[in-house]
Image: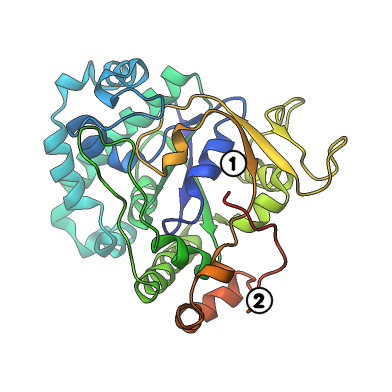
Amino acid sequence: MTQKVLYIGGFGRSGSTLVERILGQLPGFCSAGEIVFLWQRGLIEGQLCGCGTPVPECDFWTRVGKTAFGGWDEIDAHEMVALQHRVDRNRYIPSMVAPRLRPQAQADVDRYTQTLSKLYRAIGEVAGARVVIDASKHASTAFLLRKVPGIDLRVVHLVRDSRGVAYSWTKEVKKPEVTGDDAFMPVYSPSSSGRQWVAYNLLFDALGIVDQTMVLRYEALLENPRQGLERILAHAGEPVTAGAFSFLGGSPGGPGVSPGESWVELGCDHTVAGNPMRFHQGRLDLRLDQAWTTKLPARDRKVVTAITWPLQVRYGYSGTPRSQRKTNG
């Protein structure tokens, strides 16, 4: 049986967790978080699932492990991490496209992709989902998933204004999923995040050459959530059914609500890793954070713009952003 996987790729702090969670509310869709971190952060470190329970103790992930492998004790997570490191790296992307460049790795690639095949299909089976959403973001993982048997891969290349991304990477964000000790997400300088923004997006542009991908601007989705979701559904080959967007309120043209005043009702999702907002349940206003326009120093804005402007233009960003509501969304 083939399992459809909707993969969200791009550079970190581009809104992938929010996009994934919105998609996870669609009928027949399952939001699984960043599956690339399941072995290390989920099973070995025991970080929290989106439901608030450590992944090894979560009923959903326990059932996934049993369905896929007969139980998590039947597979060595440390060995999977080592295997992952040998096959899932950006430097191995050329050999993923042309295996003859690295024939000695084929056995590892076959073994790991067979493992992923069992994993994704088990997630879909336990969740009763036609579509499993993976927000791992990594380009190498997207290229690798093309080789996973039994997977119908659909890739959404998510982009966000590089200056907003750069500002987000300067902020210190605590990881609530790490229990026992305080842990924080990494911090990058604007120049470093600018260079990485270019590299990550170029890799997904390259993926678009060998496979069909969909480019989605984060800002456009928040401006018109329903339209963005309809585009994603079309890319995934999924129909827009009556009541499909019942969790979405105030979309442009909605009854009694001005355009742009959108919100989403989020349930409990069993997600691995991601932005802390993956723990949020209930109503969430969909507001674009444009704090960078005033809080990112002018010099840093100029540096990021200089590094990223060719791709900024490619993705439709101008030098000055359109007027947006400035919030902490």
In the structure shown, which secondary structural element does the residue marked by tag 2 occupy?
loop
* Horizontal side, residue 197 vs residue 131: left or right: left
How far across and down, in percent of the image, does residue 2 sit?
46, 30
Q: Nearer the viewer, residue 172 or 56?
A: 172
Q: Label 2 belongs to which residue? A: 320
Which mark is on residue 157? none
In the image, what residue occupies the spot 22% across and 17% down? 71
In the structure shown, which secondary structural element does the residue marked by tag 1 occupy?
helix
* Horizontal side, residue 306 vs residue 177: left or right: right
Eyeballing the image, is 174 above or below 248?
A: below
In the image, what residue occupies the spot 54% across and 61% down? 160
Residue 215 sits in quarter: bottom right
Kindly identify the amino acid type of the residue bearing the numbered disc 2.
Thr
How far across and down, in percent of the image, does residue 299 sit?
47, 83
Q: Label 1 belongs to which residue? A: 236
* Horizontal side, residue 147 vs residue 279: left or right: left
Query: Disc 1 to disc 2, how far (Cα)?
Result: 32 Å
How far across and down, in percent of the image, does residue 105 sit?
16, 53
Instruction: Tell me the mark number nearer the camera, choosing from 1 and 2.
Output: 2
In the image, what residue occupies the spot 55% across and 66% down? 161
How far across and down, in percent of the image, does residue 147 sit?
35, 46
